Image (cartoon, rainbow, N blue to C red):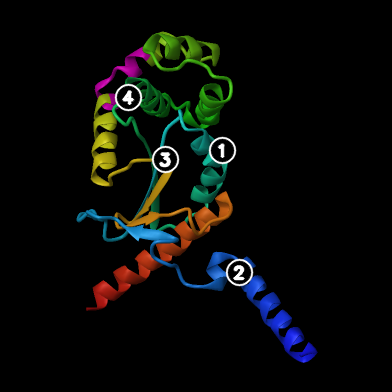
C-alpha cells in the first residue's frame, strides 16, 4: 500500500509540474480554452504578414494594466507580424472621445510619450477626458499645443481612422476589451491564462498556428 501511495504521489507531482509549465512547452492550444475561431474571418489578409489586432479603450482599467507588457511584447514580434491597436467606442460618446484622443495623439507624434499617461489619468486619477474641451485642457497640461491638437482631433484623418476602427470592431464582434485577434481568424481567450504574460504566450502560439496554416494552404 505504501508503494502504491508513493507511486501515486510521484504521478501527482509530475502532473502538477506539467500544469505549471509555460503554455508553449506544455501542450497544444485547446480551442474553447485558449482560443476560439472568429465567426466571420477576414478574407483579405496580407499574404506576407500576419496581422495581430488589439482592441482596447483608455476607459478600460485592464487595458491600462496590460498596456506596458503588450508594448514590450509587440516590439519583439517577428518581421512577418504586423501589430495594430484599435480603440473601441461601443457606441458611447465618452469612449469615442477617448478613441479620438488616441488617434490625435498618434498624428501629433505624442502617442509614445502620453499613451500610458492617458490610461492612468482616466482609470486611476479619474480625470474627465470624455469631451473635447476636457481633452484640450488636459493635453495643454502635457505641453501639447491645444489649438494645433484641436485641429487634429477634428480632422478628416481622425474621422477616417475612427470609422475604420468601428468597422473592425463590428467585423470581429468585439464585445469586451482587451481583445486580441490573430490573423483575422483566431481570438485569444483568457481561460487558459493565469497571468497577463501567459495571455501573450497564447497569442504567440496562435501566431505560429496561423503561420503553419498559411504554409499548409500555400503547399496545397
Marks 4 and 3: in contact by CB < 8 Å? Answer: no
Quadrant for the N terminus in the image? bottom right
Which tag, 3 or 1, sits closer to the chain's start?
Answer: 1
Task: For mark 1, give the secondary structure.
Answer: helix
Q: Which mark is residue 19?
A: 2
Residue marked by disc 3: 177
Circle 2/circle 3 CB separation < 8 Å: no
Residue position marked by numbered label 1 in the rendering: 65
The tag earlier along the polypeptide, 3 or 4, is: 4
Q: Main secondary structure of the magenta part?
A: helix
Label 1 Cα crowd, 10 Å radius (few <14 / some 14-19 / many 20+): some
Eyeballing the image, is 217 above or below 154? below
Secondary structure, mark 2, is: helix
Between the C-alphas of marks 2 and 3, the distance is 27 Å
Residue 73 colored magenta?
no
Quarter occupied by the C terminus? bottom left
* Residue numbers of the magenta segment: 150-158
Q: Disc 1 and disc 4: Cα gap in Å?
A: 22 Å
* Label 4 sits on residue: 92
Amino acid at each position: 500500500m505504501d508503494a502504491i501511495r508513493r507511486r501515486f504521489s510521484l504521478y501527482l507531482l509530475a502532473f502538477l509540474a506539467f500544469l505549471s509549465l509555460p503554455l508553449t512547452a506544455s501542450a497544444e492550444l485547446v480551442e474553447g480554452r485558449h482560443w476560439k475561431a472568429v465567426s466571420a474571418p477576414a478574407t483579405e489578409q496580407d499574404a506576407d504578414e500576419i496581422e495581430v489586432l488589439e482592441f482596447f479603450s483608455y476607459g478600460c482599467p485592464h487595458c491600462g494594466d496590460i498596456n506596458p507588457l503588450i508594448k514590450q511584447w509587440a516590439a519583439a514580434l517577428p518581421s512577418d507580424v504586423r501589430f495594430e491597436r484599435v480603440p473601441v467606442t461601443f457606441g458611447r460618446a465618452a469612449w469615442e472621445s477617448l478613441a479620438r484622443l488616441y488617434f490625435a495623439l498618434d498624428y501629433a507624434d505624442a502617442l509614445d510619450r502620453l499613451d500610458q499617461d492617458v490610461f492612468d489619468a482616466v482609470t486611476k486619477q479619474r480625470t474627465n477626458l470624455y469631451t473635447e474641451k476636457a481633452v484640450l485642457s488636459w493635453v495643454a497640461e502635457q505641453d501639447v499645443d491645444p489649438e494645433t491638437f484641436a485641429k487634429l482631433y477634428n480632422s478628416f484623418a481622425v474621422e477616417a481612422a475612427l470609422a475604420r476602427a468601428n468597422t473592425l470592431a463590428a467585423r470581429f464582434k468585439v464585445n469586451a476589451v482587451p481583445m486580441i485577434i490573430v490573423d483575422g481568424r483566431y481570438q485569444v481567450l483568457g481561460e487558459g491564462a493565469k497571468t497577463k504574460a501567459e495571455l501573450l504566450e497564447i497569442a504567440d502560439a496562435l501566431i505560429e498556428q496561423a503561420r503553419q496554416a498559411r504554409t499548409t494552404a500555400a503547399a496545397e
